[in-house]
Image (tube, rainbow, N blue to C red):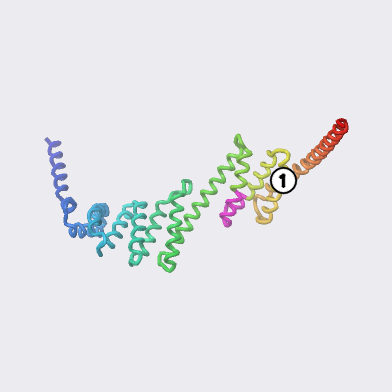
């Protein structure tokens, strides 16, 4: 009997809810009533209910003087309910439609801010972060005197930091893979990646470490190279070592770099002797080939 009473109470509550003010309003065909209700729920922070009512009324009031505020509120409802991608799209549409509105500046900032909040951590794909950067740059270009300018620049700095960490993670991945089955490919990838990183992020805290690793991997690359390419690559490695000393004269990595440098110099000296012998033998073979060819011509005559 008690279970039946509870079920009856639940049914009564559901029926009462179905007949509540919002449900009645949602079924209304009076656009003025819907518009007023949507604004009311928006002001009260009932954003999901406001979205439902704005969805019904916005197509009707499109082009009227009431549409501007409704469109902004609609975008902000999505932001408040953490639907950031949708919010960004609606704020962007608002700015394009009402670029002379007093709310245009705020809408463009909120477009950028929504994309910023949706951007992922550094270990994930950064495509949406790049979209956020583009939106922030658009905002600061359009409104350099905005009260939100500093916030926008802080967001930009944070996103650039994520790009930097993502790039550093990629560099670390290549560095780990160099000890795999195909070291030559990853040695070369490391060299290119490290150089690009230091070029793209000249002020990064990781540059000193990567400059040391560049000496290490370039020496390893040279040691694993074919005979005729080894000399040039060893010289490249020694050049990276010289650059390291110039940029980081007091580095904690200096001792390790010197060890690698000495090893590279010994390898280069030994290889230079071998290369000289190789070139001498090659010259002898060419001379012998020419001599044999000349003899053949004489014999034919």
Specify the segment rendered in magenta.
194-210
Q: Is residue 161 magenta?
A: no
Secondary element at image label 1: helix
For image coordinates 44% across by 53% down, the residue present is 131
Q: Residue furthest front?
A: 301
Q: Position of residue 150 (x, y in %)?
A: 44, 64
Is 292 on the left-hand or right-hand side of 193? right
Residue situated in front as seen by the camera: 113 or 254: 113
User: What residue do we see at 47% from left, 55% from top?
Assistant: 159
Q: Nearer the viewer, residue 32 or 146?
A: 32
- The image quadrant of residue 301 is top right
Toward the bottom, the furthest residue is: 145
Name the one closer to the observer, 204 or 51.
Answer: 51
Which residue is the extreme one toward the top?
299
Residue 90 shown left or right of residue 175 in the figure: left
Q: Please rate how many residues cluster around mark 1, counting C-alpha atoms within 10 Å: few if below 14, some from 14 to 19, many from 20.
A: few
The percent coordinates of residue 235 (x first, y second) are: 72, 47
Q: Residue at x 44, y 67 (%)?
A: 144
User: Quadrant where the N terminus lies?
Assistant: top left
x and y, in percent, of residue 274 in the image: 79, 39
Q: Mark 1 highlights which residue?
A: 232
| Dominant secondary structure, magenta | helix
Q: Relative to residue 123, is residue 45 depicted above or below? A: below
The quadrant where residue 231 appears: top right
Picture mark count:
1
Q: Residue 252 in the image: x percent, y percent?
A: 65, 51
């Amino acid at each position: 009997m008690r279970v039946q009473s509870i079920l009856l109470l639940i049914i009564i509550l559901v029926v009462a809810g179905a007949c509540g003010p919002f449900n009645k309003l949602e079924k209304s065909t009076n656009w003025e009533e819907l518009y007023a209700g949507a604004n009311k729920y928006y002001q009260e922070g009932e954003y999901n209910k406001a979205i439902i009512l704005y969805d019904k009324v916005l197509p009707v009031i499109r082009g009227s003087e009431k549409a501007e505020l409704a469109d902004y509120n609609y975008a902000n409802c999505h932001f408040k309910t953490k639907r950031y991608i949708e919010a960004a799209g609606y704020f962007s549409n608002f700015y394009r439609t009402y670029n002379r509105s007093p709310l245009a500046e705020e809408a463009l900032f909120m477009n950028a801010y929504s994309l910023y909040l949706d951007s992922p951590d550094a270990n994930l794909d950064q495509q949406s972060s790049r979209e956020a950067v583009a939106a922030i740059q658009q905002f600061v270009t359009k409104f350099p005197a905005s009260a939100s300018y500093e916030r926008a620049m802080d967001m930009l700095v944070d996103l650039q930091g994520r790009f930097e960490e993502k790039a550093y993670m990629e560099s670390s991945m290549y560095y780990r893979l160099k000890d795999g089955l195909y070291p030559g490919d990853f040695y070369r990838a490391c060299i290119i990646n490290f150089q690009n990183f230091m070029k793209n992020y000249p002020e990064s805290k990781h540059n000193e470490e990567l400059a040391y690793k560049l000496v290490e991997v370039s020496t390893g690359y040279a040691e694993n190279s074919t005979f005729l390419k080894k000399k040039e690559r060893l010289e490249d490695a020694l050049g990276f070592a010289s650059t390291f000393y110039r940029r980081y004269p007091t580095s904690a990595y200096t001792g390790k770099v010197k060890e690698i440098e000495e090893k590279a110099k010994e390898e280069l000296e030994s290889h230079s002797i071998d290369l000289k012998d190789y070139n001498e033998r090659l010259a002898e073979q060419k001379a012998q080939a020419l001599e044999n060819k000349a003899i053949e011509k004489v014999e034919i005559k």
